[in-house]
Each structure stands twice: as C-alpha cells, then as structure tokens.
Amino acid sequence: MSKSFKLVEPRGAEAAPSTSAQPATETDWSLCFICQKTTPESLTSPSQNTRQDKGCSYSILAGHLRRFNELGLLPNSFLLSRLDEGSGVEAALSANNARYHKTCRLRYNKTKLDRAEKRHLKIGANEEEEVAARKRTRYLSRPSSTETKHQELKCFFCGEALGSAGLHEAATFQLDSRVKCLAH
C-alpha cells in the first residue's frame, strides 16, 4: 500500500511572486524595513519615541547598515539601495516612519559592527603578512668545517687548562672581579 500526495497552491499564491529567489526592490514600510516579513514579534518605531532626538536611532542604524554593506556583510536578500529614495537612507527611514523588529535591529548593532570590522582588518593584515612572508628570503650562515678552530677549554675560575690542576675550592676574594670581567 503506497501513499500518494498532491501539492496544492493556496489561493492567490500563483499570482504572488516568490520573494526568496530575488531580493525585494520596493520597501513595504508597514512591515519591518530590514526583513520585510510579518512575524509575531512587535515592531519598534523610533519616530513614535517620546525622546527629543527621535531621528538619532535612524541615523545610527543607517550608518551601521552602510558600513555593513561596505564590508559586504549584508545578506543578499537585503538591498540597501531599496531604502534610499533619493535623499539618503536616513531621510527615507524618518520620512516613512520606518519600523523594525528588535531582533532584526540587533543583527546590525555597534558591537557586531565593531567585531566585523576587527575581523575584516585581521583578514587584511593576515593577507599582507602572507605576501610579505612570501617575499622575504631567509639565509642561514654557518661557518664551514675548515674555519672551525678548536678552542682550548679553560677553567672558569682560574683560567688554566682543564685537568691540569684538578678541582678548585672557590673563595670570593678575587673571583668576583674575574667573574664580572668574563660576564662582560
């Protein structure tokens, strides 16, 4: 006994284009302007904030989004150009009373931007070091065996050849000056 299934499109689905294949070029300002999705999470609108610097949130977020875009870290589904209506991203956000999900906003906060820039700089520095390491040639010089001179081994304390006087008993009367002299 085998089961068979038939996929059925909901009404109106064939008329609606799929948004997952291509990024949206128009912004629906009634949705989260970042993800353009309807979710159970509530939308935050800085323009409805009671603070005097209402546009500050938009300017900070626009700056962060621009920097993420420069680093190439915005997802392919998010086109920053769709937010610019000719007068800049910040102006478009405040003119349209842009709203966003808090989780979407947190993806592009200052901490994540700083970390991304640090990673980007580290990657750039590593590439430069690799190039410099490839260019650098190291030479190891060793004296040839014919140049090696046999140095006579001498006692550290008295300066005589080994084995001639046997063991020494050391006192500190004049040894300190000899040790200091040999140390320099």
Image (cartoon, rainbow, N blue to C red):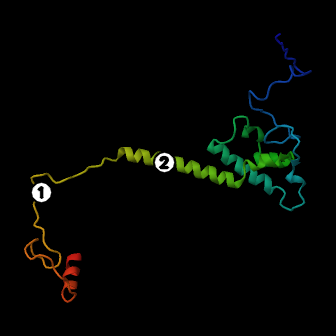
Q: Up-down: is 171 above or below 1?
A: below
Quadrant location of the C terminus in the rendered image: bottom left
Query: Secondary structure under badge 2?
Result: helix
Side (left or right) of 73 relative to 29 = left
Left or right: 127 as drawn, with respect to 2: left
At a point 87% along the width and 38% down the height, the residue shown is 38
Between marks 2 and 1 in the image, the one whose residue lies nearer the viewer = 1
Residue 2 appears at what percent x and percent y?
82, 11
Q: Is residue 183 left or right of residue 122?
A: left
Which residue type carries mark 2? Asn
Where residue 141 appears, x then y in whole percent? 21, 52
The total number of labels drawn is: 2
Q: Callout 1: 10 Å neighbours few (<14), some, many (20+)?
A: few
Label 1 belongs to which residue? 148
**Mark 2 or mark 1: which comes first in sequence?**
2
**Residue 130 to residue 175: above or below:** above
2 and 1 marks in contact (CB < 8 Å): no
Seen in the picture, residue 20 relative to 97 is either above or below; the reply is above
How far apart marks 2 and 1 lie (CA) works out to 42 Å
Residue with the mark numbered 2: 126
State the residue at coordinates (9%, 52%).
Answer: 146
Nearer-the-camera pick, 75 or 63: 75
Q: Quadrant of the N terminus?
A: top right
Which quadrant would residue 12 be assigned to in this image?
Answer: top right
Amino acid on which disc 1 is placed: Thr
Q: Residue furthest left?
A: 164
Q: For residue 15, which numbered disc appears in the image?
A: none
In the rendered image, the residue lying farthest to the front is 166
Whether residue 56 appears in this view of the structure is yes
Q: Position of residue 148 (x, y in %)?
A: 12, 57
Residue in the image at 84% along x and 17% along y: 7
